[in-house]
Image: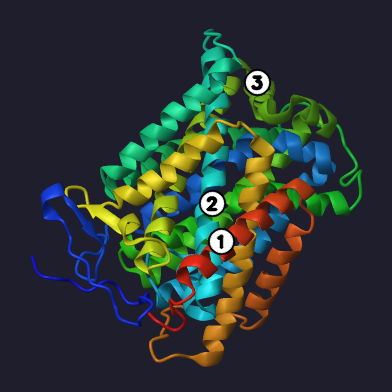
Amino acid sequence: MGDTSPPTGGTNVEGETPRIEPTVETEEATITDEAELERTLGLAGGLAIGIGTMIGAGIFVFPGLAAGNAGPAAAASFAIGAVVALLVALPASELATAMPKSGGGYYFISRGLGTLAGTVVGLSLWFGLVFATAFYLVGFGYYAVDTLAELGITVGEGLVIPTALLFGAGFTALNVTGTENAAKLQNGVVALLLSILVAFLAYGGLDAAGLIGDPAAREQFAPFGAVPVFSTAALVFTSYLGFAQVATVAGEMKSPGRNLPLAMVGSVLVVGVLYVVTVFVATSAFGSDRLADLGETAMVEVGRHYLGTAGAVAIVFGGLLATMSSANASVLSTSRAIYAVSRDALLPAGASRINLRYGTPHVALGLAGGPILVLTATGRVELLAEVASFLHLIMYGLICVALIALRRDEPDWYDPEFRVPGYPVVPVLGAISSFALIGFMQRASQIVGLGVMLLTAGWYVYYARDVDLKGKL
């Protein structure tokens, strides 16, 4: 088979573009301009990835923890997170319609700000998604055990991590067999999950408003002051990582000029409303002190409060679906982040090899799944969540900066189908608010996040400093 040219972007030390031959006999190939990932995802698939990734921990794990930190004002913490996410989703939507390529935020930043920023963000995105996916899988393990307990089968928490590891390997294998298969699972899970949540929150909302049932006891809205509201927003921001996952699969979306902005902005709006209503319903049921005592399983008891055993079973099953969809979507997005970085020669070319039978980057999926399973085994829920938020907030802030840089330079190829309303105010506020939230995080999470960024900068110096990506498609 003759040579094929790699995608534009990376060059070797001598300045020549390397040429790579795909190996058909082993059903593998290196992604090239002639062998792109197939565009199989529509608007429903994009919304399912965004909503499915965001809806897990936000509703089923964080309400008890957030109410303990901020009281009823935890609802405001989720609202703050939604506003920050929207301020980034709009600039990301413009960039995505101008550059509908797999890799999302990494791709935008590397083309707008250059190779150093691209390398740090691209590799940090890889690790950030790994931390996030491990967080979702640990949550899935807890909800799997709780589901069995509600059905009268007590297995104990000793099976939480083994269950998480087993399903993490299963989600990785599923994504190897094709993006369309993973998207079908995602669409079905999210549809069922939303049905459960809307029914539960409708009943709980009527009760909390005093229209049915007994009136809820009133609490001071922000009993601990304003600072805990923002620190809680930093903690729960992990809940809003999903909208950016849509951009990582931009290269596989149909009609990206229309579907990308709708999927990113729409998923933030839907999930933000669900979060705020959920915290309102939960604090009305028990009060913030009681929710704090219940911790990660608070929503199960809220369901029991409103609808008895049936409510508890519905919530625990919903939590199982939510963490499943989050983990599945994040495995997909992690592999696409790795594949995009490898395409640009910031990682060895082997990382962007695809399986010709399924059309998926199976090597990148292996590089995603392996570290995910290692971190899942630690079981450190809060640290995993905050480090994931730290690394994503860095990327989100730089996405906004990249938009400003590209608008200033206006390269010939920059022709987005969607433009941010309120420019430049929106991207400036998006960058400032993203970086500001980091300051409210725990010190341990900040240290781990900075450590990851230093490692990625070291990799740039060692391996990628001769690659020039700025301004290239």
Q: Which amino acid type corresponds to the residue marked 2 in the rendered image?
A: Phe
> Which element type, helix, strand or loop, lies under badge 1?
helix
Q: Dot 1, how many residues are within 10 Å of its Cα: few (below 14), some (14-19), or many (20+)?
A: many
Quarter of the figure with the C terminus: bottom left
327 horizontally vs 378: left or right: left
Label 2 close to label 1 by CB (< 8 Å): yes
Q: Is residue 41 above or below residue 382?
A: below
Q: CA distance from mark 3 to mark 1?
A: 46 Å
Q: Mark on residue 304?
A: 3
Q: Mark on residue 127?
A: 2
The colour scheme used to paint the residues is: rainbow
103 horizontally vs 90: left or right: left
Q: Could you say which is closer to the camera, residue 375 or residue 463?
A: 463
x%, y% of residue 195? 48, 37
Camera-side mark, 2 or 1: 1
76 horizontally vs 92: left or right: right
Q: Quadrant of residue 36?
A: bottom left
What residue sits right under mark 1 in the picture? 456
Q: CA distance from mark 2 to mark 1?
A: 10 Å
Label 3 close to label 2 by CB (< 8 Å): no
